[in-house]
Image: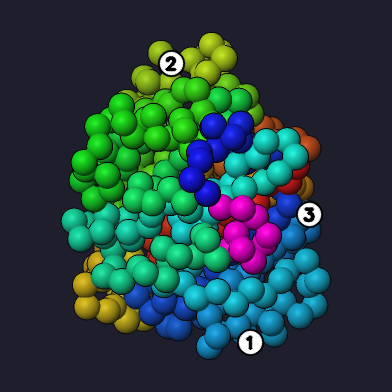
Amino acid sequence: MISTPKADKFYMPAEYASHRGCVMIWPVRPGSWPYGGMQAKAVFSQIAIAIADSEEVWMLADEEHIHEVEETFEKWPNIHPLQIDTNDAWARDVGPTCVVNGTEVRGIDWEFNAWGGDYDGLYAHWEKDDVAASQICKALGMKCYDAHPFVLEGGSIHSDGEGTVIVTEACLLSKGRNPQMSKEQIENQLKDYLGAEKIIWLPSGIYNDETNEHVDNVCAFTGPATVVLAWTDDENDPQYEMSKACLDVLEKETDAKGRSFAVHKLPIPKNPVCITEEELQGYEFEEGEDVREVGERLAASYVNFYISNGGIILPQFNDENDKVAVEILGKLFPERKIYPVYARAIIVGGGNIHCITQQIPEV
């Protein structure tokens, strides 16, 4: 399609709007998922089953692993194996960003370059990931806008469905994305493709986030003019100043409809989540792939949750703030069931529950 969503009167809905379903990808990449992804597959399965309580799930896998998906979910009719080959399991970033117009859902196929391409990308080959969005759209019967060569990942944008999109400068202005474009040009591109009227630029995301600080790890819409913001009161934590700078922006800004933001502070885990020696021994890194180190701090955040039609699938870290996160989101989504999921097996891959899911809206 040669037009843009905005020209066709399409827009990106809020994630808490009604879904047709959710796309996920079976975790098998040795450089992301230790020990053959055994623990990751168990947690991905738990998440898929929780989502399938209230919406469809399509679980992608290549030819070699599609039988695992078929066997794992044979008792769940709402979970559909879908044979599409990818380089890794980050459905949020390689899947289509969907837009709606009230009667139809269409996908957007951004250019994907492994979070930075030759400049600071996380692996050397991403060709399969880059074509996944168009293949998913074809499989699900959706028309698709080709946004190439504009580089973007689904985790770097959050929409309220009412004209406002939140992003981070750290990610969208990084030299590995669209260095030939100015901030204004990037903003205009987002407006054209997401049907947005206003872009809120937060300065940063979560400390040590290898995606160049995706917004979906630090701030998310939970309702019109209402967001959760990853937070710590520990002034010695590097995240303190980063979150404080984001709060300063949110307190000064208004959304596309002129409303001030209600900001709910969602604490990060009190104890940093770090790679262990045992986990490190389970990775198999390819040449050109970003490697991990023992003690490396991971970008753990409770903001990285998935909103299903009937629930909130929320990461947990065996931390004292786990219950706090459950309580806060329970109050913000009283009509939805909270599904707490111990998510260490995902965070060791570099992301979390929101990163491995991509919603397909319903009209």
Whole-percent x, y for residue 80 in the image: 71, 71
Q: CA distance from mark 3 to mark 2?
A: 35 Å
Query: On the image, which quarter does residue 330 sit in?
Result: top right
Q: Residues within 10 Å of mark 2 (few under 14, many from 20)?
A: some
Q: Bounds of the magenta span?
A: 136-144
Mark 2 lies on residue: 253
In the rendered image, is residue 343 in sight? no
Mark 1 or 2, nearer chain start: 1
Residue 332: mark: none
Residue 355 vertical placement versus 329 (above, below): below
Residue found 78% across the figure and 58% down from its top: 53
Q: CA distance from mark 1 to mark 2?
A: 49 Å
Element carrying mark 1: helix
Mark 3 lies on residue: 54
Mark 3 or 2, nearer chain start: 3
Mark 1 lies on residue: 67
Element carrying mark 3: loop
Q: Residues within 10 Å of mark 3 (few under 14, many from 20)?
A: some
